[in-house]
Amino acid sequence: MGDEYGVHVSGGGRISGPIAMGAHARAVVVKGGGPAGAEALLERLERLLAAHETDLAEPARARRDAGDIRQELVETEPDRSRILDALSRLSARAAEVAPIVEVVSQLRALFP
């Protein structure tokens, strides 16, 4: 394999921050309450809920679930179980709308 995935740091300084190495490696920085990327996914979810409102049996409740997630993400320490509960409800409410289910799955992956 060789050194193509090696990390070399010199200079005697201190390293602070994410470092990832290897094929498909990811380094994630979490700032504030929610994980990186959650805000962008939540905005996409809200746009999809609006665009597919007529396809949802309970659009107002789906929007409320998204609002619950948004509210939790502004907390210093978001309650993971509350977020996952809201995502589960959204999955059920939007089961017939693949783009919404996809975003819900991506959000769920941020809260292992």
Image: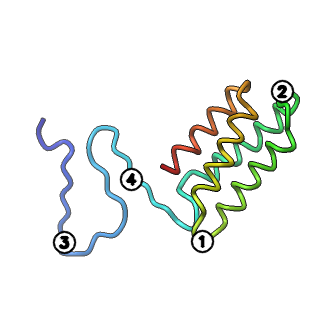
Quadrant of res 107: top right
Specify the quadrant that holds the N terminus: top left
> Looking at this view, is 30 or 96 the one in front?
96
Disc 4 secondary structure class: loop
Return the residue at label 4. 27
- Asked whether, in this view, residue 31 is left or right of residue 8, the answer is right
Who comes first in sequence, dot 4 or dot 2?
4
- Asked whether, in this view, residue 35 is left or right of residue 15, the answer is right
- Rounded to the nearest whole Å, what is the CA distance between mark 1 and mark 3? 35 Å
Who comes first in sequence, dot 1 or dot 3?
3
- Rounded to the nearest whole Å, what is the CA distance between mark 4 and mark 2? 37 Å
Who comes first in sequence, dot 1 or dot 2?
2
- Mark 4 or 2: in front is 2
Return the residue at label 1. 76
- The residue at 57%/60% (across/down) is 34
- Rounded to the nearest whole Å, what is the CA distance between mark 4 and mark 3? 22 Å
Return the residue at label 2. 55
Disc 1 secondary structure class: loop
> Looking at this view, is 112 or 35 the one in front?
112
- Rounded to the nearest whole Å, what is the CA distance between mark 2 and mark 3? 58 Å
Is the residue marked by circle 3 packed among few (<14), some (14-19), or many (20+) residues within 10 Å? few
* Picture colour scheme: rainbow
Residue 57 locus on image (x, y percent): 85, 31
Task: State whether residue 35 is above or below residue 5.
Answer: below
Return the residue at label 3. 11
Amino acid, disc 3? Gly
- Mark 1 or 4: in front is 1
